Amino acid sequence: MQKNARIFLGLLLVFSALGLLLRRVELNTCLDRSTMLMDFHPVSALLLALSVLAAAVFFLLGRTWLSGKETAEYGRVFHGKGLLAAAAVVLLLMLAGSLLCLRSWKTASGPERLFPAILALLGVLAGAGWFTLALEALRGGKGRYSGAVLPVLFAAFFLVAFYKTYAHQPALLYTLYPFLGLCCALAALHLAAGFTVGKYRARWTFFFSGLGTVLCAVSILSAPDTAHKLFFAALTLMLAAQGVCLLQPHRPLPPAKETDGYAEKAETESEEAKAEGKAASDWTAPEPWDEENSKE
C-alpha cells in the first residue's frame, strides 16, 4: 500500500473514532428521549468543528495528491484483492440489512410497506453489483456502468426513505449527520460510476469518499434500527475502499498485440494506394494531334 493511502486510512480512523466518541457523548447528554429534542452544547460544537476540519483536510489532500494525476477507466483505478474483500463484506452487510428490512415490511401496513421492500431490494442489488464490479476489475475488466449505478440508486432511495421517515423530527442535530452522510455517499458513488463511461473526477470523488466515510460512520449511532445501522456501515466501508483505490497506482495498460504492427503497415499501404489513385485521377490526357494545323 502506498504511503498516501496509509495516511488516508489513518486519518479516516482518527476522524471516525473521534466523531463516534463525540456523537455518543452528544446523544447521551443533549438528547431528551421523551421529546426527541436536542440542545446545542459545547460537545455539539466540537463535533461540527471536527466535521468541518475533516472536509478541509480531505479537500486539500485531494488537490495535493491527485492534482495532475493520470485518469483512467474504472478497471484500472478500482482494483485489487483488498477491494474485493471489502466488497464481500459490503455484500454481507447489505444482505443482512435487507433481511431486517423485510421483517419490518411484514409488520407495516398501507403504502408505508413499499419503502422497506424497495430499500431491501435495492440493498441486495447494490451489494451484488458492487461485488461483481470489484471481481470484474480484479480480472482486468473495464467496469460496467450497470454495476456501478446500482449503489447510486440505493444511496438515493435510502436518502429519500430516511428523509420521509424523519423529516418531522424536531431535533435538527439528530438527523443532520445522516442526511449529510447520505448526500456525500450519493455524490461519491455517482462520481465513481462516471469512471466507467469516461468521466473522471478523481479529486471530487476522493473528497466525497473521505468526508462521506466519516459522516456515515458517525451516523451509525443515529440510525433508528439495526437495518439502517448495517446500511450505514456498508456505505462507510464502500467509501473508504474507493478513497484508498484512488491513491493506489493504476493498473498498467495491457501489452500491445503483435498484430498491431501489421495493422499499422497495412493502414500505411492503404493510404499510399489512395494517394496514388488520387494522383492518377488528377492526370489529364493530352489533346489529340491536329493534322491541318501541323501542315500549316
Image (cartoon, grey):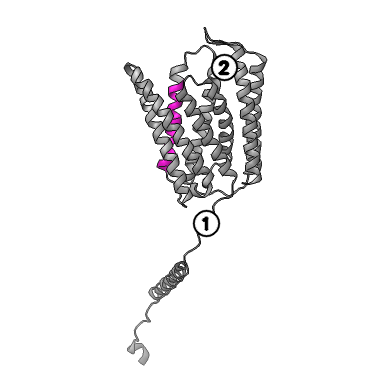
Residue on which disc 2 sits = 173
Q: How crowded is the residue under tag 1: few (<14 C-alpha within 10 Å), some, or many (20+)?
A: few
Q: Quadrant of the C terminus?
A: bottom left
The verdict on residue 224 being magenta is no
Q: Secondary structure at mark 1?
A: loop
Q: Secondary structure at mark 2?
A: helix
Residue on which disc 1 sits = 253
Q: Residue furthest bottom?
A: 295
**Which picture quadrant has residue 270?**
bottom left
The answer to whether residue 296 of the structure is visible from this angle is: no
Residue 112: x, y in percent? Answer: 36, 18
**Label total for image:** 2
Q: Main secondary structure of the magenta part?
A: helix
Could you say which is closer to the camera, residue 277 or residue 261?
Answer: 261
Part of the protein shown in magenta: 145-162
The answer to whether residue 139 of the structure is visible from this angle is: yes
**Which mark is first along the chain, 1 or 2?**
2
Q: How crowded is the residue under tag 2: few (<14 C-alpha within 10 Å), some, or many (20+)?
A: some
Real-space Cα distance between discs 2 and 1? Answer: 48 Å
- Left or right position of 284 against 46: left
Q: Is residue 44 above or below residue 195?
A: above
Q: Residue at x 64, y 22 (%)?
A: 47
Q: Residue at x 60, y 24 (%)?
A: 20
Identity, as a three-letter code, of the amino acid under mark 2:
Leu
Residue 232: x, y in percent? Answer: 50, 28
Q: Residue at x 45, y 34 (%)?
A: 92
Q: Residue furthest top?
A: 34
Identity, as a three-letter code, of the amino acid under mark 1:
Leu
Q: Is residue 182 above or below residue 295?
A: above
